[in-house]
Amino acid sequence: MTTMTDSSVREFKMPDVGEGLTEAEILKWYVQPGDTVTDGQVVCEVETAKAAVELPIPYDGVVRELHFPEGTTVDVGTSIIAVAVGDGAAAAAEPVQEAVADTPATAEAEEPKPEGRQPVLVGYGVSTSSTRRRPRKGAQAPAAAQEASAAIQAEMNGHGPAAPAAPAAPAAPATGDRPLAKPPVRKLAKDLGVDLATVVPSGPDGIITREDVHAAAAQPATPEPQAAPAAVAPAPSPTAAPASYDTTRETRIPVKGVRKATAAAMVGSAFTAPHVTEFVTVDVTRTMKLVEALKQDKEYAGLRVNPLLLIAKALLVAIKRNPDINASWDEAAQEIVVKHYVNLGIAAATPRGLIVPNIKDAHAKTLPQLAGSLGELVSTAREGKTSPAAMQGGTVTITNVGVFGVDTGTPILNPGESAILAVGAIKLQPWVHKGKVKPRQVTTLALSFDHRLVDGELGSKVLADVAAVLEQPKRLISWA
């Protein structure tokens, strides 16, 4: 076999794909060892605490090794893939099985020592001394690596290991070694009171799966000899899963990624900023007529035109008239920071959880430009391709609960912002119009704000201005 020097192998590290992020989960590999890659080619998809992101490789070469399987959470700055470049690419293209035969099973892939800070795709990675790597049990051939990755990914999702092509005998637990199991499986064993050292693994490379733990918990305990004193059972933990946990009646979903970050942010916001919510019910019949007229306008051809577009514009007009609402509270400096720009956040429900991407400098956009930005934001969120940068720097947010048929709500502030507007369902209701009761299109708006920097007068003015524009949309011309 042709040998390769370390200089011909480039180690691609997990980049810092968002400010403040320290780790990311590998969702999917798009390449395997032996594949040829080119500069800019997407090699994997990862999920951070903010979004799912595709990672492109920054150089040409041949994939030599994938350091982690799908479903693994990796620290920023840790090498995730080795690529042979230059003269080493030809040697890397040789059959992977030949490299496996010459590699000791316990050897770790040696990484080149970086000189100074090494730039990554976005920002800079953390120091390599803070990496956290799980011991590898030797290299795998491409087919075997795919099977192992699928099995581990399925286990991380709580579905058990993928069925192997041919049944294999369970491996006995290693004597004197720590049993191999993923953190969720270890927690499950702890909750069920199962000693992992006594569990027979069925996963690849002797990995213990959730099913193995459940099977061990279901086995009857070995009776103690009559002469031995009876052991006193410890009191069950109030947070522990019951030993009789029935998977057909309950589903346990690990809290991670976007959902974990959202939960932490909402708790922090709710117990840091004193929330106040005000409500107003408004006749939006004229706004709905304007929406239909804009849909027929050639200037808006191909653009997303709906009530949310005019509601967003109404909020921007209200902020222009009341700029102090567009601010944040700096606890460290004990200052109120008034923003002279509006990054308008739009709350979006996605399969990975609630995210709030924002339209940068929305205050400077014309109505057609705002329509285009809204359409792009929604489409990107639905595809799960929202970037972390798109969710940073928001100043005020709109959440449209009306799409679910809800009249209104009391929204929680997006951390770092001072106001959020909730829009309820637009319904045909009896309404007094010009002295007579008529059917009109009516909705309810709710504005939550941080009472540390927004008092009742300012919050009321902003909400009243939004309502006034939606009731008489011609005010967009005179107030904008």
Image: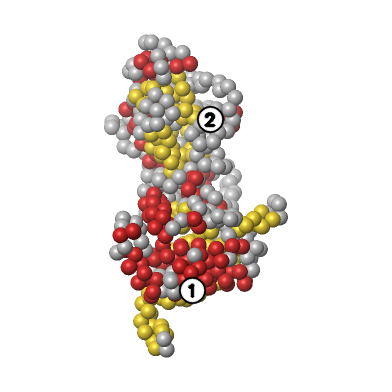
Going from the N terminus, do you reach mark 2 or mark 1 first? 2
Q: Whole-percent x and y of residue 329?
A: 64, 57
In this orientation, which residue lies closer to the viewer: 226 or 84?
84
Query: Can I make out residue 300 in this image?
Result: yes
In this orientation, which residue lies closer to the viewer: 344 or 45?
344
Which residue is found at the position 44% from the left and 65% from the top?
A: 311
Q: Between marks 2 and 1, how big is the CA–CA gap? A: 51 Å
Q: How many marks?
A: 2
Residue 30 sits above or below residue 299 on the image: above
Label 1, residues with CA under 10 Å away: few <14, some 14-19, many ≥20: some
Identify which amino acid the numbered label 1 is placed on.
Answer: Ala
Residue 211 sits above or below residue 473 on the image: above
Q: Whole-percent x and y of residue 141?
A: 35, 24
Label 2, residues with CA under 10 Å away: few <14, some 14-19, many ≥20: few
Residue 115 sits above or below residue 357 on the image: above
Q: Quadrant of residue 154?
A: top left
Furthest residue toward bottom: 435
Viewer-nearest of labels 2 and 1?
Answer: 1
Query: Can I make out residue 422 in this image?
Result: no
Q: Whole-percent x and y of residue 85?
A: 41, 19
Residue 5 sits above or below residue 222 on the image: above
The residue labelled by disc 1 is 468
Which quadrant of the figure contains the N terminus? top left
Which residue is found at the position 56% from the left and 23% from the top?
A: 114
**Label of residue 119 in the image:** 2
Identify which amino acid the numbered label 2 is placed on.
Answer: Pro
Furthest residue toward top: 2
Q: Secondary structure at mark 2?
A: loop
Q: Secondary structure at mark 1?
A: helix
**Label of residue 93 in the image:** none
